[in-house]
Image (cartoon, coloured by chain):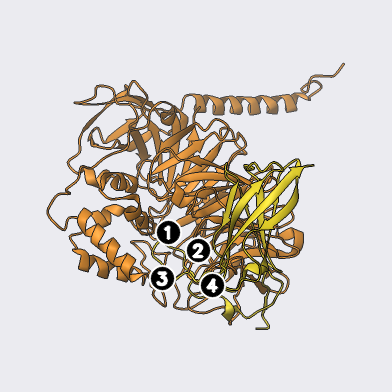
Chain colours: A orange, B yellow
Amino acid sequence: MREPAYAGLAPLHAWRLFILLYAACNVVSAESTAATLTGRVSSAAESSMEGVLVSARKDGSNITHTVVSDARGRFDFAAAKLDAGRYSLQIRAVGYDLDGPSAVDIPPPAPIQLKLRQTSDLAAQLTNAEWFMSMPGSAEQKRPLIECVSCHTFEKIARTKHDAAAMYEVLQRMTTYAINTSLVRVQKRAIARKFNEPAFRQLASYLATVNLNKGARWTYQLKTLPRPRGKATRVLITEYDLPRKTIAPHDVLTDANGIVWYSNFVENTLGRLDPRTGAHTEFTYPTIKAGAPTGSLAMDPDRDGNWWLAAMFQTGLVKFDIKTEKFQVFHLPADLNNSEAQQSMVMPRQSHVDGKVWATEIGRQVILRLDIASGKYELIDPFKYMPEGSNHSPYGLVADDRNNLFLMDFGDEVIGTIDAKTLKTTIYPTPTPRSRPRRAMMDQKRRVWFAEYAANKVAMFDPVKESFREWAVQTPYSYPYDVFLDRNNDLWAGSMSTDRVLRLNPDTGTSVEYLLPRQTNVRRVFVDDSVKPVNFWIGSNHGASIIKVTPLD
Amino acid sequence: MDAIKAVMTGLVAISIFAIPAARAAGEMGEAGAKDEGAHFFGFVKDANGKPVDQAKVTAEIKNGIKYVTHTTKNGLYKFGGFNKSVTADDVTISCSKDKFRQARIIRKTPAKAKAVKSVETECRLQPE
């Protein structure tokens, strides 16, 4: 018969075991009695308000916790496990502001009653998508505006008083800025982007009809999206503010230990965040190209957990050795490194197969392949036979287990594959024209999931069947940037326009969208599905924060 | 150029300066007259002449890139235009579908017609 584990312990050992058990019980007890915050939300117009985001932030902390009120207007922070202390409160419910209370001591003596009042400035609360919904004009007239939201919200444009001529001047000025520009860190390009003058004049004329050029108020009704309901209210959102407003987290991923790492779109740093404590560390890599805009876009690990960064206008690829915490720069050769050279994407995940890392060269709209050992780059042009003057731009990259590449053509409507051995390319048009495939991921079944940015769809490409499936995103003008299929077969996506996170079941086509607590321009999306429930991670590219979305169903 | 091994997918190494500079990515990139070469369209049909839905159609450019698309319910396929370096004779069209094999391909537009840019083909499938 097998003995119990504690049998035969010497008395001293048994005493130690008692201490350990006592301590463990105390920990459990402390967790189970953790202070919490509950309450109800109401307004003069609605006695029970569903779908109001309630945010609590402890004084002195960089972490904000958000829950959503249910159908009876109740909210409960139990899942956030708040410490006792003084917390400031905020809400998000379009059309409303918080009347009070705006702060609370936790634990409070009783559930709190949050009162909302109608806002006096609805325009300040609109998402980009709500502006696009509100404005008169055709889909084609609005389509170019998806470029604007890379750097700022549409509200900034809507509040201008420019006439068409002045607006044209502004649009021209925009071509002088690097794409990795934010309102708090404006970066100039070495050479302005080329543009289509008639298209610019047409757009300027249109914008002059939807801004405040003709008067103090907009001539159209401001429309809003509905507040979250049902499943969309069962979520906990944790937001970690970063220490500087200039940090623009772009790609946010967790490592095997649950530590969050991110690329900074506008500065030469790699960030690390411990979500358990909120502790933040930055690693700075040197200037690669003096005078060029700083910052990196894509970030992915190799098999050993080293982070690789695509250095954008700084050019080249940057590797961060996870053990030594040192950077290594793989410089672009001089004859490729002109004033427009730009590495936006990198794909090192399968580099252990053949010692090669894939990347993009946006100055020429081609693919690069780095040989790590020699530091030399190969150049592959998947769009070699496309008509001159047509738009093509390699964007999201994924690699299969033989390091064959799958590339998204963000300029147009195709995805491509490049065979790692022969470098032969195959091109597949997406079912939806002008879809502009953006970022992508590969699942365990080697299927490629990707966002069709301009089509407002998410999609899957099956390399075996050479076929696509597409799913429309429920909210118009979402413009999904990226997708991630988690272990539960839920497909997640973010938006640069709606402040919402999509969770879609590809089998049923049903979806839920979680509203975020504040304006959030979402780029790369990532799900840590090593935990239960899964954690969905994103960066607020314009808001200098890292956000975790935890579904509670 | 020694630092770069310029590998074009057609297995022909050429200078990077041969790459078109007019490519753009955005909605309002530089206007460019699309300098198109040949483009292809046509139908995939079965042995009885009925259109085949969701057949895979491949356009392979000589020593180069493959383009893959699928037919519509009417059996129609089309490939957008290639650039002017691609002539009609540089492209091979083929079709396939599960449990079928390609029986023949009929080019309805005359071969060697230099001025021809729009090329129609009919691809016939028969059960395996």
Q: CA distance from mark 4 to mark 3?
A: 14 Å
Left or right side of A328 for A393:
left
On screen, residue A69 versus residue A46, left or right, reads right
Residue bearing the label numbered 3 = B30
Total count of labels: 4
Closer to us: A435 or A272: A435
Image spot of residue B78 (x, y percent) = 57, 55
Q: CA distance from mark 4 to mark 2?
A: 26 Å
Q: Which residue is mark 4?
A: A364
Residue A247 bears which disc, if any? 1
Q: Are marks 2 and 1 in contact (CB under 8 Å)?
A: yes
Which of pointers 2 and 3 indicates the residue nearer the eye?
Answer: 3
Quadrant placement of the N terminus of chain A: top right
Q: Chain of mark 3?
A: B
Q: Are marks 1 and 3 on the same chain?
A: no
- SS for callout 2: strand
Cβ atoms at labels 1 and 3 below 8 Å apart: no
Kindly identify the amino acid type of the residue bearing the numbered disc 4.
Answer: Arg
Name the residue rendered at 38%, 42% in the picture: A476
Mark in the foreground, 4 or 1: 4
- Secondary structure of the residue carrying tag 1 is loop
- Please state the chain letter of the residue tagged with numbered disc 1 in the rendered image: A
Residue projecting furthest to the right: A1
Nearer the N terminus, badge 4 or badge 1? 1
Mark 3 Cα shell of 10 Å, populated few (<14), some (14-19), many (≥20): many
Specify the amino acid type for callout 1.
Answer: Ile
Viewer-proximal residue, A63 or B111?
B111
State how far apart marks 1 and 3 are (Cα).
Answer: 31 Å
Tell me: A27 left or right of A186.
right
Q: Which mark is residue A269?
A: 2
Say what secondary structure mark 4 lies in.
loop
